[in-house]
Image: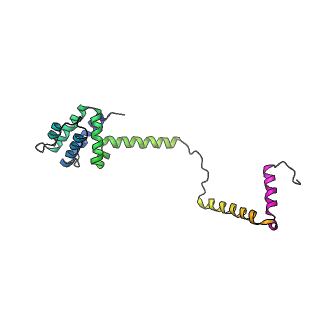
Amino acid sequence: MEGYEEQLQSDTQFLCSNQRMDTELVDSLVLQLNRIYPQILSDKEACKFRSLRVPTTERLRELLQHLREKGDDACYEFYRALHIQAEDVYFSLPTRIREREMTESRSAINVAVIPERCVLNDRGPIFFLSCFSVAVGIAFLYYYGGESCNMKTYFHSLYVYVCNPFLPSFC
């Protein structure tokens, strides 16, 4: 994984050529970096990068160069500010697209490698409801059937047979 300085180096061409990086967006990025992180961008530097006498692409190129010189933390904060100010530009950056593709390919590999652990029931909810209904019906018959239905004797003998299959049938 490359650092934010290298990522910013890779993204510089895209950012400077992108039409969505207009004067207003560059100014808001400079202001955010200046107000929140004055150690990254001082007031004097912010005024320099906000000067309208210089074309926007040139100001942006100088700002990105300045941030790369400041280090990895400054580049990270630029990416954070860009994510806040212009999410569509942030997600269309070449490094973000490459990172997303790598993540997707890794997750596809992980899904392909890990088999399905266990499927308890793949028949669906109707099958479950029908089995549950049969079980509830048998429980009602057993509980409310009384002696006239003779269900308790039947279920008791069934239970004894299932639990002790080696007993003779006359027990």
Residue visible at 23% across and 41% down in the picture: 35
Task: Give the image's coloring scheme.
Answer: rainbow
Question: Residue 17 location, x and y as percent?
Answer: 22, 44
Horizontal side, residue 127 vs residue 101: left or right: right
For the N terminus, give its image quadrant.
top left
Question: Residue 117 location, x and y as percent?
Answer: 58, 44
Quarter residue 13 falls in: top left
Horizontal side, residue 156 vs residue 44: left or right: right
**Residue lying farthest to the bottom in this orientation:** 148
Question: Residue 58 location, x and y as percent?
Answer: 16, 40
Range drawn in magenta: 147-171
Magenta stretch: helix, strand or loop mostly: helix
Residue visible at 78% across and 54% down in the picture: 159
Horizontal side, residue 6 vs residue 142: left or right: left
Q: Is residue 165 magenta?
A: yes
**Residue lying farthest to the right in this orientation:** 170
Question: Residue 161 location, x and y as percent?
Answer: 81, 52
Quarter residue 61 falls in: top left
For residue 155, above or below residue 36 = below
